[in-house]
Structures are given as structure tokens and as C-alpha cells.
Amino acid sequence: MKINEIFTSIQGETSFVGLPFTFVRLSGCNLRCSYCDTQYAYAEGTEYFLDTVIAEVNNRAVSRVVITGGEPLLQDETYILCSRLLDAGFTVLLETNGSILIKNIDPRVHRILDLKCPGSGMDKYMNLQNVDYLTMRDEIKLVISDRKDFEWALKILQEHQIQGRAHVLFSPVYGRLDPQELAAWILQGKLNVRLQLQIHRYIWPDKMRGV
């Protein structure tokens, strides 16, 4: 499988925020979000055998793993990697962009479904059948660029009855939407969602890779 980077850092997002994780970032993505901060993963990478990836994760001696991208579900080996890491006793999170069905991912995985709002430019590629496969082990993330995105997110949550199926995260686009503004909208709307900041961007503001 083609890997862009493997590193250990603090988890900057999801309900696992703040905990040490080993990150396995796969190469390749089928979307081109307007705010993407990992464009280097579109094509850069090295081919690894699955055993080599697992050995590298083991050597880092951290019990939690994030499989991310790019879009990890573009590579068939991702499904096997998830299961083998779980069998080895790791907690596994998988971050996916919402365009590919998640139903065949090992049910023990914590699936982080990044549902793209219009501000990303990629909302038309979302496969909303994914909502049917969510469980309370999973999290759905909506990255908000502006008030239009916020209103769109509310509509999607209501139309697809997402709340109660999975944990819901609202995240402001770093540098585009003031977190205070998004916090105010959430409070004004009396929403039962989690405001999420990318804390790794605040800890390492000048570093893009390996965090």
C-alpha cells in the first residue's frame, strides 16, 4: 500500500483529542477541498508491505492508531490493515471523506466521517448512504466555512436524522471562520453538537507535516 507518512503526535481532533496516537497517512485522494491542509498527500508516498506498516506502528509503542489520508478507503489494503491492528489490540480510528461507503470497514473501528459542506467545493460528491451505517462508536465531522455552511449542516442533520446515530462535531475552517463565531451560532441554536478545534494547528502553527 502507498503510505505518505507514519508519525506519532497528539490527536488534534475528534473526541479522542489530546491523546497520543500513531498516525498512518495514506497517499491519494479523490477530492480537492478548498481548505485542504494535506495536499502533499495527493501523490507523494512510498509503497509498503502491510507487515512493514504494522511493524512500524508496533515500534512506536502507542496503543492508539489513526488511519488517515488523503482518502484511505481508495486503497483496498486499508480494510485489512484496520482489522489486523484491531486484532493486535490497538484502538483504531479511520478518517474518511464521505464519498466512499463505509459499510465494509471492520465494525470495531471508530469511523470519523468528514461530511463535506458547500464551502469545501466537494459537497456534491458526498455519499449520504453512509449515514445508514453510522453507530454511536462513530463520529461525523462537519467543517464549517461560513454561515451558509452552518445552515447547510443543520439541514443535513435534520433531514437525515443524524443526531442519535453518531457523535456530531462542528469544526471551523482554520483561518477562515472565527471559532468564537461558530461557538455563538451553536449556543444560539441550542445545538447538541461538539465544537471542535484542530488543536495541533495551535500547538504547531508553523508545521504542517508530522503533527
Image (cartoon, rainbow, N blue to C red):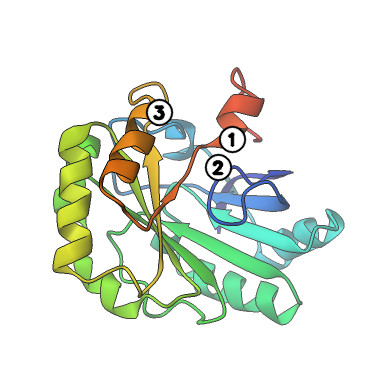
Mark number, residue 180:
3
Give coordinates of residue 35: x percent, y percent.
Answer: 34, 30
Instruction: Kindly indicate the quadrant of the structure image that contains residue 104.
Output: bottom left
Give the label, 2 or 3, closer to the camera: 3
- Distance of mark 3 from mark 1, alpha carbons? 15 Å
Residue 30, position in %: x, y? 30, 49
- Going from the N terminus, do you reach mark 3 or mark 1 first? 3
Q: Secondary structure at mark 3?
A: helix
Left or right position of 163 against 127? right
Q: Earlier in the sequence, mark 2 or mark 3?
A: 2
> Can residue 121 be seen in the rendering of this structure?
no
Q: Helix, strand, or loop for circle 1?
A: helix
Position of residue 154 measured from the top left corner of the image (x, y, whole percent): 20, 53
- Residue 57 visible in image: yes
Q: Quadrant of residue 113?
A: bottom left
Q: Which residue is mark 2?
A: 45
The amino acid beneath tag 1 is: Ile
Relative to 13, say whether 72 is above or below: below
Label 1 vs 2, first from the N-terminus: 2
**Residue at the spot 68% in from the left edge and 69% down from the top edge:** 91
